[in-house]
């Protein structure tokens, strides 16, 4: 029977969110904002109707996953620190019906394709591959039945989902755990009949592996048990495999037969894994010495689920994105040293589909933004400075080469030092590269929103007349504006009074106000994409990060530019990856996939699904190749030039999280400034007049935050003996009101993210960022005035005033000088 799915209302987690906001605002701690996230885990074939007739209790799986991975805090690669956002994870574990199991087994049975040259180590079993895109329609039906129809039923009953977003199904994120019966899917046998839950004898348990194995590929690439779909779910097939995949130069992140737990390990020990006739030790090396318990298997399964959540649903952010521009200009510049072909010309195998690329960029943009895609082909021979930079950026590295027969030898490989090359482009005297990079440099927005909000320039000083041309691209202003901006990104500076006292309005009025803000914040962000199409290069040239890390890549992304490498003479390059004992090859002549990956990383801060940053482990990057296959353009085994719906949502959430992180850090600086002022001028001077309130939680007993500071100021005002106040009552009331208003906005923002209302979250986070920017300026100004008022003395320089006494003393001094010179003159001998 199909287990019911229920999306919990935000009221169930409101207290956790309110507690985190209270801690980070009023007690000046580094605690992050809690953002609840609900993950659905769908058990397919684990209700006694799949392989080995395993029946897992949904409550047990939910308990293990929740207690093993209940929260996750993403990190930012740009700042090398954790973000002030923490996902509070909750799990819905549901079981699919027997009809769903039958439909999936039929879909797999009809799409099993034999691979003659691929065999497991030490095994003579038949090997099959399954095209994952052919299974997606069956999984989409289950997803719709479970989540979208279930959400419609909740709204139809007038639950918490009804109201403003009625008619819009909740966008659930899900993990499908498949445990399908391989004997029923065997294409060499007739289709079975009978109940799915019939008990198995010992002989039938022995034959459950069916004498074959299978693995998934996505768009013809990869060999995996797990894969990311085109929608908002990921698939983990416990019946597939076992799989081996990894990097020859990395000791961590490889996929081995024991990476994904196998159901057979609960029933059999060192018996053959694939067929009852095989007794090879290599084929059974991953099995335990004795059968595992169901609890052990459930714990291993929960670990795989937590890894999926960490890499796919709560990933890191590559770059902080505070883009407030109305338009994004993506300039694809091809720099070629040959005339074999032009990548921008259509009609050949290496052509770039600019229309498809523009459609993908559109899916990465924020609401209200538009994209302008321009392209151009240039010869490197006409740009000698850029050609010299490319030559200087080529590096060589000693490696151990593995040959087809398994033997090894020492050799070298060449790669482009991408960060150095980008720096040389920026510093070069060539206007094609340096001018675009100068226009795309994010220093302006960084100065406005990251570290120094006081560096903002008034928009009126940057306005020009209608006749003046923009230095990069002419931006047509909205109808309400009279002058176009002169900078690429130019947010409008707002006064503090424009942000204070924001009242709760109806949704329609609030949206119209936000749209008006978007109309005023017009401008153009420029993202240059340099495509290096090179020929005549010795060896198999690739691209790498700092110090040669990540050598073998074809794309490098920075916050202000993207570099893509195309080698015109190499149709395939042997990478340092091995899959199922065979080397993995890449196609460096194709540009569509690396272009999409680079632009998604630069514009949306997207991180590859198999990468994450371990801040607590010396800020090192870790790769988990379990998630290398699927609907994404990253990695050596990807063959997709588009982004899944899950990754598009991740880009939009990255922008919201970036604004939240910047907003909270700015508020922390404001609160710290108020606390420093109080510690300097109020606490020590008043003695026992001011009492330090403490938080009820022992964790905050030693922390005196903004709430203590404001109460100290109130205690100061209640002293009747003081006639002058360093900070007026109205200022303290405004500070208190503003912090309370920020608390309400953050709670509302967390609610939008939980309900997956990303457009509303985008507008609210944008308004909150401007609100904090004005609040920061206001606090600095008021504290500066208060510092001046609390100073004990002043040094003033002024001209002396003219009085009668000063004139008398001056005339006497002049008369004295006159008498002195006369005496000297007449006392001379000649006179």
Image (tube, grey):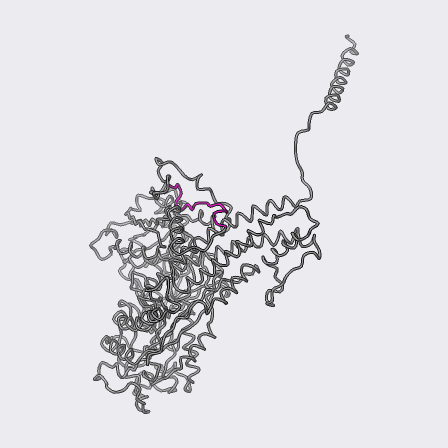
Q: How many marks?
A: 0
Q: Quadrant of the C terminus?
A: top right
Magenta run includes residue 498: yes
Find residue 806 and report its image quarter: top right
Numbered range of the magenta stretch? 484-500
Find residue 797 and report its image quarter: top right
Q: Quadrant of the N terminus?
A: bottom left
- Position of 5 with respect to 769 (left or right) is left
- Position of 789 with respect to 501 (left or right) is right
- 592 or 504: nearer the viewer: 504
How would you classify the magenta stretch by its main secondary structure?
Answer: loop
- 304 or 573: nearer the viewer: 304
- 734 or 359: nearer the viewer: 734
User: Where does residue 134 sit, x and y in percent of width and height?
Assistant: 25, 71
Residue 421 shows in this picture: no
- 540 or 323: nearer the viewer: 323
Above or below — where is 463 with respect to 139? above
Magenta run includes residue 814: no
């Amino acid at each position: 029977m199909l287990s019911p799915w229920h999306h919990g209302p935000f009221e169930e987690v409101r207290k956790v969110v309110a507690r985190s906001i209270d801690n980070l605002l009023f007690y000046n701690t580094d605690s992050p904002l809690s953002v609840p996230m609900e993950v659905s885990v769908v058990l397919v074939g684990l209700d006694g109707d799949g392989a080995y007739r395993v029946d897992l209790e949904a409550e047990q799986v939910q308990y293990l996953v929740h207690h093993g991975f209940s929260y996750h805090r993403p990190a930012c690669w740009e700042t090398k620190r954790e973000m002030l956002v923490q996902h509070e994870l909750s799990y819905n574990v549901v079981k699919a019906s027997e009809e769903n199991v039958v439909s999936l087994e039929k879909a797999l049975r009809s799409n099993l394709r034999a691979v003659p040259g691929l065999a497991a180590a030490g095994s003579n079993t038949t090997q099959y591959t399954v095209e994952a895109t052919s299974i997606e329609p069956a999984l989409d039906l289950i997803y719709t039945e479970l989540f979208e129809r279930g959400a419609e039923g909740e709204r139809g009953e007038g639950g918490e989902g009804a109201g403003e977003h009625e008619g819009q199904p909740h966008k659930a994120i899900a993990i499908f755990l498949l445990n399908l019966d391989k004997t029923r899917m065997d294409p060499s046998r007739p289709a079975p009949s009978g109940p799915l839950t019939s008990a198995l004898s010992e002989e039938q348990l022995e034959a459950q592996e069916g004498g074959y194995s299978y693995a998934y590929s996505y768009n013809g690439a990869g060999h995996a048990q797990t894969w990311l779909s085109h929608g908002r779910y990921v698939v983990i097939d416990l019946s597939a495999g076992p799989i081996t995949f990894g990097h020859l130069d990395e000791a961590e992140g490889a996929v081995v037969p024991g990476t994904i737990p196998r159901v057979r390990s609960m029933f059999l020990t060192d018996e053959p894994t694939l067929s009852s006739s095989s007794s090879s030790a290599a084929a059974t090396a991953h099995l335990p010495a004795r059968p595992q318990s169901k609890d052990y298997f459930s714990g291993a399964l929960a670990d795989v689920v937590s890894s999926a959540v960490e890499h796919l649903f709560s990933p890191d952010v590559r770059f902080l994105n505070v883009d407030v521009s109305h338009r994004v200009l993506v300039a694809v510049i091809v720099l070629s040293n040959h005339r074999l072909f032009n990548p921008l010309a259509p009609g050949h195998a290496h052509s770039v589909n600019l229309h498809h690329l523009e459609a993908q960029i559109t899916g990465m943009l924020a609401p209200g933004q538009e994209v302008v895609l321009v392209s151009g082909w240039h010869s490197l021979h006409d740009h000698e400075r850029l050609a010299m930079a490319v030559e200087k950026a080529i590096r060589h590295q000693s490696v151990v080469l593995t040959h087809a027969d398994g033997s090894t030898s020492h050799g070298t490989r060449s790669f482009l030092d991408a960060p150095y090359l980008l720096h040389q482009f920026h510093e070069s005297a060539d206007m094609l590269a340096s001018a675009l990079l100068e226009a795309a440099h994010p220093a302006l927005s960084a100065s406005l929103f990251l570290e120094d909000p006081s560096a903002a320039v008034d928009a009126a000083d940057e306005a020009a007349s209608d006749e003046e041309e923009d230095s990069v691209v002419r931006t047509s202003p909205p109808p309400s504006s009279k002058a176009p901006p002169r900078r690429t990104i130019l947010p409008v500076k707002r006064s503090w009074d424009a942000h204070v006292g924001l009242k709760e309005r109806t949704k329609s009025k609030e949206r119209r106000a936000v749209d008006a803000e978007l109309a005023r914040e017009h401008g153009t962000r420029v993202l240059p994409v340099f495509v290096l199409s090179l020929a005549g290069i010795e060896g198999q040239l690739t691209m790498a990060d700092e110090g040669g890390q990540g050598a073998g890549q074809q794309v490098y992304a920075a916050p202000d530019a993207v570099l893509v490498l195309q080698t015109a003479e190499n149709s395939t390059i042997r990478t340092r990856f091995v899959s199922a004992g065979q080397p993995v090859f890449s196609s460096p002549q194709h540009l569509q996939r690396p272009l999409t990956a680079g632009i998604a990383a630069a514009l949306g801060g997207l991180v590859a699904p198999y990468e994450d940053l371990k801040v607590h482990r010396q800020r090192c990057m870790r790769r988990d190749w379990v998630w290398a296959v699927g609907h994404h353009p990253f990695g050596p085994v990807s063959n997709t030039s588009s982004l899944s719906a899950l990754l598009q949502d991740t880009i939009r959430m990255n922008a919201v999280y970036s604004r939240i992180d910047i907003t909270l850090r700015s508020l922390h600086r404001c609160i710290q400034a108020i606390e420093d002022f109080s510690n300097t001028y109020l606490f020590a001077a008043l003695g026992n007049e001011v009492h330090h309130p403490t938080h009820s939680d022992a964790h905050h007993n030693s922390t005196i935050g903004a709430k203590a500071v404001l109460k100290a100021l109130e205690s100061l005002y209640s002293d009747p003996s003081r006639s002058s106040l360093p900070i007026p009552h109205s200022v303290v009331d405004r500070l208190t009101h503003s912090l309370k208003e920020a608390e309400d906005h953050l709670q509302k923002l967390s609610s939008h993210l939980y309900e997956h209302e990303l457009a509303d979250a985008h507008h609210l986070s944008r308004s909150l960022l401007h609100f904090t920017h004005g609040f920061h300026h206001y606090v600095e100004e008021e504290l500066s005035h208060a510092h001046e008022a609390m100073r004990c003395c002043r040094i003033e320089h002024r001209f002396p005033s003219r009085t009668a006494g000063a004139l008398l003393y001056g005339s006497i001094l002049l008369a004295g000088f006159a008498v002195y010179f006369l005496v000297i003159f007449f006392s001379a001998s000649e006179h």
